[in-house]
Amino acid sequence: MSSIISEEKFEEIHEYSLKVLEQTGMRFLSEEILNSLEKYGAIIDRVKNIARIPGKLVQEKLDEQIEQIKKGKKQILLNGGVSSRSENKISCKFGSGAFFIFDWEKQEKRRALDTDVENAVIFGHALDDVGAIGVPIISEEINGKKIHPDMLPIYRAMVVAKNTSKVANNEVNTVKQLKYLMEMGSVVRGSMDEYKKNPCFITAKHPVSPLQLDKDACDVLIALARNDLPVTVIPMPIMGTSVPVTILGAMILANAEFLGALTAVKTIVPEAIVMGGSMPASTDMMTGEISYDMPSAIKMNIAMANFYEKYYDFDFGLGVYCSDSKFLGPEIIQERTIQLVATAMLKYFNPPVGLYDQGMVFSPELALIEIDILKYIFDAFHKEVPDDDLDRVLKAIENAGPAGTFLAEGHTMKNFKAIYKSDILKEVVDTVHNKKEKGMFDLANEKYKKIMSELTPYRLPQDKEKEIDSIVDRAHKDILEGNK
């Protein structure tokens, strides 16, 4: 698609991002990063942990990465909340970690149990249009037992590993966790070499806006780089609160956060590839609430993707990932349709699905509806018009003639099934009593139950399952008992 901001602005956004880093600086709660930046000429405020980074240094490190990518270094973005460049096919994500699930039978949201997490992973594995599964829902218990927060990422990865081959992102909060998540990934992929070619169980770190990376985020980013794994930085700009309220102002600050992190990591590990994206929201100045689906947030997402693709030639994490609405209903459908159109305009066909209430609630019914909406958008705007037998078309027209019909024509019988039609994006009406019997959420629930009742769950081979259990046991001893 054409850019929604002029390309002359790209140079200004870049230049002003460099000015932010040089004049205002960025706060890194990491002695290693501050020391490394200082060696490269940054001015360090040791009291505030702020590095004022020369624009020349940022440009140098950025150019190094651009050259690495030109020479074939792979760009990999692993994060459950963003879309990225994808092949010309639908491959949605389960994996942005909602805390609640919508219970259809009780018609209410509730805290997720470990069985809900497992069922969500199994469900995602059964859907052809879901290509990546991280942690769709977050439970803090396993078999009714509360899990220590430091072990939660390990247990969540275990559940995903055992129930799908579509393993993707996973929360990583500490360097110790990363060690065991890498081991689990190597079991799933077959070896550490294969794991590094196709990594999983890692995700992005988010700057604490504005312009700050905390110690754990710094440590994890450096550890990812040292292990030759994708380093992903996803700013979460809240327009009017954590970044300027205007789109260009927000872009400059979010881009400065990404470039600051890229420069910091590459001064320590020059061969690292640091990828980025953003998950913008807008502040409602009347209520103080934040919104991910206001037009300004969506527009910033599109503008940032245009900027990264055309100015840096980088892939970009597009954070159009959920509805703000708190209840399942037409409001969500309207909001998500607009967001999914935005991702499809950029030919990003791998958005996260199933989330609402600002990503706090997961609904399998909503996931099915969103997938079918994306299919409609794909079919209408991106799928090529299929070839046709034009001699047969002409014959059908002759047979029907003026004022005729094509219902009984062989051409119609042959081709009508190729027209995509959703079995849930509709309503079921009692025409006798002129009333609605079922809506799309009702139909989606019926489809969800049918899928779950008929599927054969994926299970990791038993020998690999034992390896995963052994890794979890060792992680428990090291992370918890080692900290005593």
Image: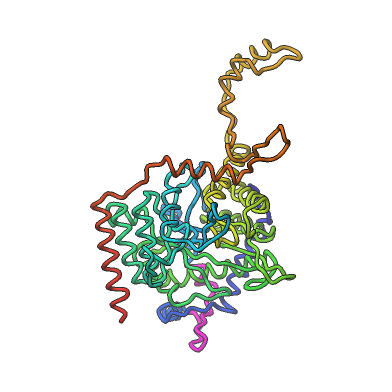
61 up-or-down from 35: above or below: above
List the single residue furthest toward the left: 463
Relative to 350, does residue 58 appear above or below in the rendering?
A: below
Drawn side of residue 183 relative to residue 137, left or right: left
Is residue 242 or residue 338 the one in the foreground?
338
Q: Position of residue 466 (x, y in %)?
A: 25, 57
In the rendered view, does 219 fall on the left or right side of 327? left
Q: Is residue 236 left or right of residue 473?
A: right
- Quadrant of res 266: bottom left
On whether residue 31 falls in the magenta region, the answer is no
**Residue sticking out furthest to the right:** 403
Q: Residue at x 64, y 37 (%)?
A: 428
| Picture layout, residue 30 above or below residue 167 | below
Check if residue 48 falls in the magenta segment: yes
The answer to whether one can see residue 98 in this image is: yes
Along the line of sight, the residue nearer the viewer: 348 or 17: 348
Q: Tell how many labels.
A: 0
Please tell me in which quadrant of the rendered image residue 243 appears.
bottom right
Residue at image coords 43%, 67%: 140
The residue lying furthest to the front in this view is 433
Q: How is the image coloured?
A: rainbow
Q: Position of residue 99 (x, y in %)?
A: 50, 63
Instruction: Say if residue 64 shows up in the picture.
Output: no
In the figure, 455 relative to 229: above or below? above
**How far from the left and from the top, in percent, is residue 162?**
34, 53
Q: Quadrant of residue 445?
A: top right
Q: Position of residue 306 (x, y in %)?
A: 61, 54
Residue at x-position 70% and y-position 67%: 246
Name the quadrant of the C terminus: bottom left
Find the magenta span and give its range: 42-60
Residue closest to the far bottom: 47
Residue at position x 76%, y 15% in the image: 403
